[in-house]
Image (spheres, rainbow, N blue to C red):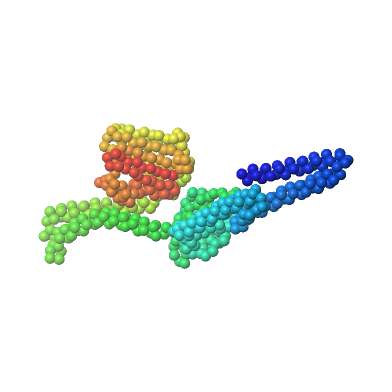
Amino acid sequence: MVYKHFGIKIGLMIAALAASAFLFSWSIMQDHLIVAKFTFAILFFLQSIFLFNFIKSNNRKLGHFLELIKNEDFIQRFSKFEKEASSMELNRLYNEIIESFEQIKIEKESEYSYFQNILENVGTGIISFSDNGKVELINQAAKDLLKIGLLNEINDLDKVLAGFSNELLKLKSGQQKVIKFFIDGELIMLSVKAAVFIIRKKTIRLISIQNITNELEEEEIDAWQKLIRVLTHEIMNSVSPVKSLTSTIIKFFQSHGKPKKAKDISDITIENSLTGLHAIEKRNQGLLKFVETYRSLTKIPKPNFEEFEVEDIFATIKLLMNEELTRKNINLTLNIIPENLTIKADEKLISQVIINLVKNACEAISEDGEIKLEAYRKSDNRVVIRINDNGKGIPKDILEKIFIPFFTTRENGSGIGLSLSRQIMRMHKGNISAISKEGEGSVFTLKF
């Protein structure tokens, strides 16, 4: 409506100016209209000035309006009282636009304040900085974790830990890393994760920092307690009968705390003593075997990383396991997508892991079962290998213990196979996980 009134007014001014110009031109050609000539000339001149001032006034008002918007000055307002309705309407429209921008600014400031409060009160440390190293944002949690005050440049973090800023700069988007260092003589372990994005052609790195020292210590203590329970159980199983047999044999050769004479020792006593000594020897051998098994957990060779095709491992395993698979009538199927899928790892160590898992799957299947070996590459470029069986499954209360060293439910099992597998996968910066439902089978997944 405002533009319509403004356009009509400009149109009428131009029409009036054109009429004055026409009348002035016509009067010039009439010799007897001397007064009219001056009248029309003055009228044309006044109309030109009026049109010029009108346009200049509106341009000045528009320029002032744009200047207010540019400087985000939403306090000033245009007068609501004008002589002309179109100017009054235009001022009202300018004021409405200013008020709209003011409301948007208030909402943005409220949102910024809201997110600032969230960042300040969240327990996770947050640091964001640009490619030139200038810190854009750091919340209180990050300051508390790193025991620093103000942080203007990311390189200033090196005062807390030498090379810390370089570690942050090397992190790729989505990458997570645990960084250990000492602050005031205390070991701190931080889980650091990076996100990289671009705002207005400027690259911003957002770093989240969490102190996981307590969590890791609790997990470590829990792991040690579980290990000690297993070790205690195994050692006591060997030592208790040895102690009992030793006491019995001592009684064979002592009477009232004194050694018996040779003539008082019968052949049956000697025979029983030898039987007891053989039992002690057997338990000692079992204990030595247990210790050797324990030592094997700490003697895993350093991986020799080479690129190879997954199909080679699968084909070798199928050949090695063929006899047992045939004997138990178990069908082993292979599925690799794509067929030439490659992985960079230690082929021997990874083969050892998969063979152990396939053997476990065979033992979980009575007969006429099926084992599936699958391998594929995820969208994030990680290679996944899955060992799936339709065996008896693993009870829920046992599933959470299967990776504990020496834990086993098999009579002749050592309990280190899955523990070794987990260590090997960690050495490859990967992981191994298991899901199982009793009576339906199990799935072990290796992620590289």
Q: Residue at x 30, y 52 (%)?
A: 290
Query: Where, quadrant-wise, is the N terminus in this rendering?
Result: top right
Where is residue 122? Give x, y as percent.
45, 58
**Closer to the camera, 20 or 386?**
20
Q: Is residue 343 visible to us here?
A: no
Where is residue 291? Give x, y as percent.
31, 53
**Closer to the camera, 271 or 383?**
383
Query: Where, quadrant-wise, is the C terminus in this rendering?
Result: top left
Q: Residue at x 27, y 35 (%)?
A: 367
On screen, residue 425 versus residue 283, left or right, reads right
How many marks are shown on the rendered structure?
0
Q: Residue at x 39, y 57 (%)?
A: 216
Where is residue 307? Give x, y as percent.
48, 41
**Closer to the camera, 353 or 295?**
353
**Closer to the camera, 152 or 104?**
104
- Name the residue at the right extreme: 31
Q: Residue at x 73, y 50 (%)?
A: 53
Q: Quadrant of residue 21?
A: top right
Q: Is residue 138 visible to us here?
A: yes
Relative height, residue 42 to residue 251 (above, below): above
On screen, residue 100 versus residue 317, left or right, reads right
On screen, residue 5 versus residue 204, left or right, reads right
On screen, residue 80 versus residue 358, left or right, reads right
Relative height, residue 242 to residue 51 (above, below): below
Relative height, residue 411 to residue 139 (above, below): above
- Name the residue at the bottom extreme: 184
Where is residue 188? Give x, y as percent.
44, 61
